[in-house]
C-alpha cells in the first residue's frame, strides 16, 4: 500500500504516471524491449525525447529565443558549469539559503563572486528584497535561487536586471506559470517536481549561450550539448522518458494554471493551520514562504522523534527536516494531492491535542 511521501527529493511521483510506466516497463509499445534497454540513437527513443522536449516547451511557453537541454549532474554540476562558461571575471550572487550558499561556494573557486544581498545573519528566515539588490552592471550575470528547498524560503517576483539572469529552480519548476523569456539560464534538478534523479533541465537563451567558454571540454559546454540535441553523450534515458510522462500528465491535468491553484491551496491549508496553532510554528517571513517546501517546528523539540514515528505509523513519510536546520518539513510538490495535505493537517491536530 502506497503512503504519502513528503520527501524533498527524490520526491513523490504521480500514481497515474507510475501506473503507465509499470505497464510499459517490460516492453515499450511493440518494440520487444524496455525503454531502459534501447539505444538513445534509435528512432523510437528519438521520438520519446522529442515529444518530452516539446511538451516541456509547451508547458512553460518557452520562446524560440531559448533552447531546452536534458543534462546530467544535478544542480550541483550547474553550480560549476555556469561560472566556468559565463563568469568572464565576476558575477553577482544572492544568498538566501543553503543551496544558493553552495552555488556561491562553487563559483568562488572559479571567478570573483559578489554576494550582493544576503539573509544569512537572520538564519535565512527571509529572502533579501530584490528592490534593494546592489546589482553590478559590469558583472557577467546575476544568480539567485527562487525557492530554497531546505529553509523553505522563496523569492516570488522575478528580479529586474540589465545583466543576464540565472536561476536555480530545482524545487519550484513547473509549480506555476513562469515568464521564461526574462531569464538567460534556468536550471533544475528533476528529482523534486519532475521525476527520478539523474536528469537536469536547462532552459538557456541562445544568444547568451553563444558566449560559452570555447576552451572547455565539449562535455562542459552548453553549445555543444545544444548542437547534439542533448545527446553529446548517452543521456539518462529512463529519467528523460519519465520526465516526458510527467509533462504529459501535467498537460492532461490542466497545465500550470491548474497546478498553480492547487499548490497555493495546499500551501495555504498547511500554513493556515500552523499559524493558528500554539504548538507548531514556521520560521519564515510570510511574504517569503515557499509553496513547495514548508518547514515547521514543534513547541518541544524532544517530541520530534515521537512525531516522526507516529506520522509514519499513520502513513505520512519523510517529514523530518534537513539535518542542517532540524524540525520538520513537508514538501508538497505537484504530485502531492490536496487530500494528502489535509491528512497531514488532521494528524497534526491529533498530535497537538495529545501532546500539546
Image (tube, rainbow, N blue to C red):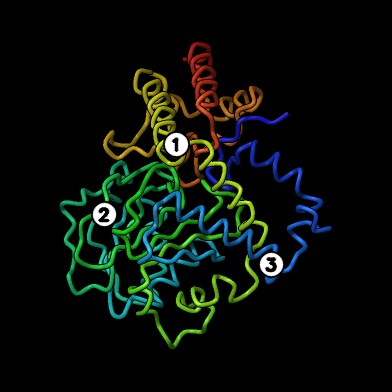
Image quadrant occupied by the N terminus: top right
Q: Position of residue 65 (x, y in %)?
A: 35, 66
Q: Please give the name of the residue rendered at 68% of the width and 68% of the height, measured from the top-left corner.
A: 40
Q: In the depicted view, which residue is nearer to us: 66 or 174?
A: 66
Q: Position of residue 280 (x, y in %)?
A: 41, 24
Q: Which residue is mark 3?
A: 43
- Mark in the foreground, 3 or 2: 3
Q: Position of residue 310 (x, y in %)?
A: 62, 23
Q: How many labels sit on residues?
A: 3
Q: Earlier in the sequence, mark 1 or mark 2?
A: 2
Q: Which residue is mark 2?
A: 118
Q: Secondary structure at mark 1?
A: helix
Q: CA distance from mark 1 to mark 3?
A: 33 Å
Does residue 297 appear left or right of residue 38 in this picture? left
Q: Earlier in the sequence, mark 3 or mark 2?
A: 3
Does residue 165 appear left or right of residue 38 in this picture? left
Q: Secondary structure at mark 2?
A: strand
Q: In the depicted view, which residue is nearer to us: 349 or 46?
A: 46
Q: Please give the name of the residue rendered at 36% of the width and 54% of the height, measured from the top-left corner.
A: 145
Q: Secondary structure at mark 3?
A: helix
- Eyeballing the image, is 258 above or below 86? above
Q: CA distance from mark 1 to mark 2?
A: 30 Å
- Badge 2: residue crowd in 10 Å (few <14, some 14–19, many ≥20): many
Q: Please give the name of the residue rendered at 23% of the width and 68% of the height, measured from the top-left corner.
A: 163
Residue 70: name its quadrant.
bottom right
- Badge 3: residue crowd in 10 Å (few <14, some 14–19, many ≥20): few
Q: Which mark is residue 31?
A: none
- Eyeballing the image, is 355 above or below 336? above
Q: Which residue is mark 1?
A: 259
- Mark in the foreground, 1 or 2: 1
- Mark in the foreground, 1 or 3: 3
- Badge 1: residue crowd in 10 Å (few <14, some 14–19, many ≥20): many
Amino acid at each position: 500500500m502506497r503512503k504519502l511521501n513528503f520527501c524533498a527529493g527524490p520526491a513523490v511521483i504521480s500514481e497515474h504516471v507510475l501506473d503507465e510506466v509499470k505497464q510499459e516497463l517490460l516492453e515499450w509499445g511493440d518494440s520487444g524491449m524496455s525503454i531502459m534497454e534501447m539505444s538513445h540513437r534509435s528512432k523510437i527513443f528519438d521520438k520519446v525525447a522529442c515529444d518530452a522536449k516539446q511538451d516541456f516547451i509547451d508547458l512553460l511557453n518557452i520562446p524560440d529565443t531559448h533552447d531546452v537541454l536534458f543534462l546530467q549532474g544535478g544542480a550541483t554540476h550547474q553550480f560549476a558549469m555556469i561560472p566556468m562558461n559565463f563568469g568572464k571575471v565576476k558575477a553577482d550572487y544572492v544568498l538566501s539559503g543553503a543551496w544558493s550558499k553552495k552555488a556561491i561556494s562553487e563559483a568562488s573557486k572559479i571567478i570573483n563572486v559578489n554576494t550582493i544581498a544576503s539573509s544569512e545573519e537572520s538564519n535565512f528566515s527571509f529572502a533579501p528584497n530584490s528592490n534593494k539588490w546592489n546589482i553590478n552592471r559590469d558583472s557577467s550575470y546575476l544568480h539567485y535561487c527562487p525557492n530554497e528547498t531546505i529553509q523553505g524560503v522563496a523569492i516570488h517576483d522575478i528580479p529586474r536586471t540589465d545583466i543576464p539572469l540565472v536561476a536555480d529552480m530545482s524545487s519550484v519548476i513547473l509549480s506555476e506559470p513562469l515568464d521564461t523569456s526574462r531569464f538567460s539560464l534556468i536550471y533544475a534538478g528533476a528529482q523534486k517536481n519532475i521525476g527520478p534523479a539523474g536528469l537536469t533541465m536547462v532552459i538557456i537563451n541562445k544568444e547568451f549561450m553563444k558566449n560559452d567558454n570555447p576552451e572547455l571540454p565539449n562535455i562542459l559546454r552548453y553549445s555543444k550539448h545544444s548542437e547534439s540535441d542533448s545527446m553529446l553523450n548517452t543521456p539518462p534515458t529512463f529519467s528523460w522518458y519519465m520526465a516526458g510522462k510527467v509533462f504529459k500528465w501535467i498537460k492532461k491535468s490542466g497545465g500550470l494554471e491548474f497546478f498553480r491553484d492547487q499548490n497555493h491551496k495546499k500551501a495555504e491549508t498547511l500554513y493556515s493551520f500552523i499559524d493558528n496553532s500554539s504548538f507548531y510554528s514556521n520560521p519564515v517571513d510570510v511574504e517569503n514562504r515557499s509553496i513547495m517546501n514548508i518547514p515547521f517546528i514543534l513547541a518541544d523539540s524532544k517530541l520530534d522523534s515521537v512525531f516522526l514515528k507516529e506520522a509514519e505509523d499513520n502513513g505520512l513519510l519523510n517529514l523530518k527536516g534537513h539535518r542542517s536546520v532540524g524540525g520538520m518539513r513537508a514538501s508538497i510538490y505537484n504530485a502531492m494531492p490536496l487530500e494528502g495535505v489535509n491528512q497531514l493537517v488532521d494528524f497534526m491536530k491529533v498530535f497537538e491535542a495529545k501532546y500539546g
